Image: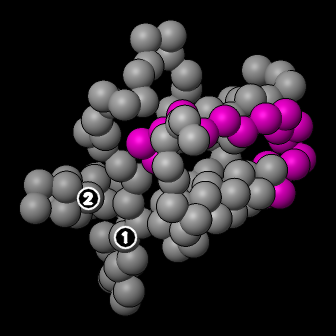
């Protein structure tokens, strides 16, 4: 009858995502996970301190993909929201030690971002 039809695979993925969040962030006193549609979720925590800890202790990954976490903003609309930036993980195997300085790493990262 009424309501949107969601494929079982999507439902399982949403349930997996919610279970993962409740499990991995259990020490942060997560109280609820809400599916906002369009692959956006709202996480509720018992305190502002827990929110800050989750946002600052990452990066976080789910099924091998890095998660793009943002603080909630009142005008957020999941159905029209676009993602303009995303976290990335870059490995630089065998990078010589002389390049392990903030200035050098910043130049390397800037070159990669501009690809």
Q: Residue at x 28, y 53 (%)?
A: 106
Q: Is residue 49 visible?
A: no
Q: Nearer the viewer, mark 1 or mark 2?
A: 1
Residue 91 is one of the magenta-drawn residues: no
* Pointer 1 residue: 90
Q: Residue at x 83, y 22 (%)?
A: 47
In depth, the one of 56 and 4 nearer the eye is 4
Residue 34 is one of the magenta-drawn residues: yes
Image location (x, y in percent) of residue 20: 73, 60
The residue sitting at the top extreme is 74
Q: Residues within 10 Å of mark 2 (few under 14, many from 20)?
A: few
Name which of mark 1 and mark 2 comes first in the sequence. Answer: 1
Q: Is residue 54 visible?
A: yes
Image location (x, y in percent) of residue 5: 50, 49
Q: Which residues are magenta?
A: 23-39
Quadrant where the N terminus sits is top right
Q: Using the rendered view, name the quadrant where residue 114 is placed.
A: bottom left
Whether label 1 touches label 2, CB < 8 Å: yes
* Pointer 2 residue: 109
Separation (CA) of disc 1 from disc 2? 9 Å
Image location (x, y in percent) of residue 73: 50, 16
């Amino acid at each position: 009858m009424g309501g949107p039809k969601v494929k079982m695979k999507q439902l399982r993925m949403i349930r997996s995502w919610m279970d993962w969040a409740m499990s991995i962030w259990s020490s942060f006193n997560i109280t609820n996970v809400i599916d906002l549609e369009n692959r956006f979720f709202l996480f509720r925590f018992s305190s502002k301190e827990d929110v800050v800890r989750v946002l600052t202790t990452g990066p976080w990954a789910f099924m091998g993909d890095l998660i793009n976490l943002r603080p909630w903003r009142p005008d957020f609309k999941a159905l029209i929201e676009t993602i303009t930036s995303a976290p990335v993980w870059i490995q630089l195997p065998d990078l010589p030690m002389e390049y392990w300085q903030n200035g050098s790493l910043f130049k390397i990262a800037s070159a990669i971002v501009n690809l």
